[in-house]
C-alpha cells in the first residue's frame, strides 16, 4: 500500500507551484526534445515538426476543456455555459486527443502536406508516451483520478483513509510499458508510415478501457464512461491504420 501524502508544492509569494503543473511542463518538454532528436534521426523537417506540434497543443488544450465540460459535466455546463470559456477549469484526455486530431488535420491542410504527413504524425505518436508518462504521474501525485477500494499492493491511502486504486499511477505504469515498447522499436528507420500512430492507438485503448471501470467519479452513459467510448473508437482507428500501413508495404509502396 502507498501511504497518503500531500501533493508537493512550492510557494513563491502569492504564487503556488504544484507538482502536477511541474510534471505536465516536464512532460511537454521531454516530448519536444524527443521530437527534435527523432526528427534529426529520420531526416524530417524540424520547422514542419514544430508547426504541427504548436497546432496540436493549441487545439488539444482547448478541446480538452470543452469535451470535459460537455461529456463529464453536462448538467453543470447547461446551467453555466460560460464555464466553457474557463479553459483552466478541468480538462479531459480524450477531449485533448480529439483536439490534437483536429489540430493535426488543420495543420496538414494549411501547410499542404502530401504523402509525408504520416511520417510527421508518426513522429508525434512516437514521442507521446514519454510526455503522457509525466502527465499521468502528475495525476498520481494530485489524486486526480480516484478509483474503487482495493487490496492491490499499489493501492493508495486517500485523505479519507480508504485505500483505493490511484488511476493516475496505474495508467502511468501502463504508459511506461508503451514507452519502453516504442523505444525498442524506434531504432529502425524503415517502419511503414503510420506504424506508430496505429500502434499507439491500438495499445493505449484497451488499457484505458479497462482502467476506466475502476473510476468512481466519471459520468457514465449506458454503464460506460466517455473515455471507454473513446477507447473503442481509438482501437478501431488504430487497427485500421496498422492494417492500412501493412497493406501498403505489402503492395510495395509507402502508406499515404
Image: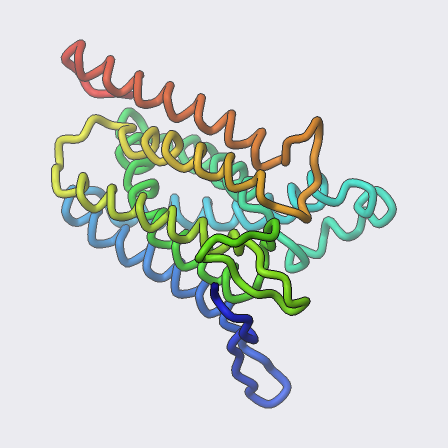
Q: Which residue is at the far top?
A: 251
Q: Is residue 94 left or right of residue 126?
A: right
**Quick check: 206 above or below 85?**
above
Q: Is residue 170 left or right of residue 64?
A: left
Viewer can see residue 58 = yes
Q: Residue 224's quadrant in the figure? A: top right
Q: Residue 6's quadrant in the figure? A: bottom right
Q: Identify the residue at image location x=38%, y=46%.
A: 174
Q: Is residue 201 left or right of residue 243?
A: right
Q: Which residue is at the far right?
A: 79
Residue 204: x %, y % from top left = 41, 37
Q: Nearer the viewer, residue 184 or 249?
A: 184
**Quick check: 3 above or below 32?**
below
Viewer can see residue 48 = no
Q: How is the image coloured?
A: rainbow
Residue 8: x %, y % from top left = 51, 77
Amino acid at each position: 500500500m502507498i501511504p497518503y501524502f500531500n501533493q508537493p508544492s512550492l510557494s513563491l509569494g502569492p504564487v503556488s507551484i504544484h507538482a502536477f503543473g511541474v510534471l505536465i511542463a516536464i512532460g511537454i518538454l521531454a516530448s519536444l526534445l524527443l521530437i527534435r532528436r527523432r526528427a534529426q534521426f529520420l531526416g524530417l523537417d524540424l520547422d514542419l515538426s514544430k508547426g504541427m506540434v504548436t497546432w496540436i497543443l493549441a487545439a488539444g488544450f482547448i478541446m480538452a476543456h470543452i469535451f470535459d465540460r460537455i461529456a463529464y459535466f453536462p448538467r453543470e455546463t447547461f446551467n453555466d455555459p460560460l464555464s466553457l470559456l474557463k479553459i483552466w477549469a478541468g480538462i479531459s484526455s480524450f477531449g485533448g486527443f480529439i483536439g490534437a486530431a483536429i489540430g493535426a488535420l488543420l495543420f496538414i491542410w494549411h501547410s499542404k502536406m502530401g504523402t509525408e504527413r504520416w511520417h510527421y504524425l508518426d513522429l508525434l505518436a512516437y514521442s507521446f508516451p514519454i510526455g503522457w508518462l509525466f502527465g499521468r504521474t502528475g495525476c498520481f501525485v494530485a489524486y486526480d483520478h480516484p478509483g474503487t477500494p482495493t487490496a492491490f499492493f499499489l493501492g493508495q491511502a486517500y485523505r479519507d483513509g480508504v485505500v483505493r486504486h490511484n488511476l493516475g499511477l496505474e495508467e502511468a505504469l501502463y504508459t511506461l510499458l508503451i514507452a519502453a515498447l516504442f523505444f525498442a522499436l524506434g531504432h529502425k528507420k524503415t517502419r511503414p508510415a503510420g506504424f506508430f500512430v496505429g500502434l499507439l492507438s491500438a495499445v493505449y485503448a484497451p488499457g484505458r478501457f479497462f482502467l476506466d471501470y475502476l473510476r468512481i467519479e466519471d459520468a457514465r452513459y449506458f454503464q460506460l464512461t466517455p473515455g471507454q467510448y473513446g477507447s473503442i473508437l481509438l482501437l478501431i482507428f488504430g487497427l485500421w491504420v496498422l492494417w492500412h500501413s501493412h497493406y501498403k508495404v505489402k503492395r510495395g509502396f509507402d502508406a499515404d
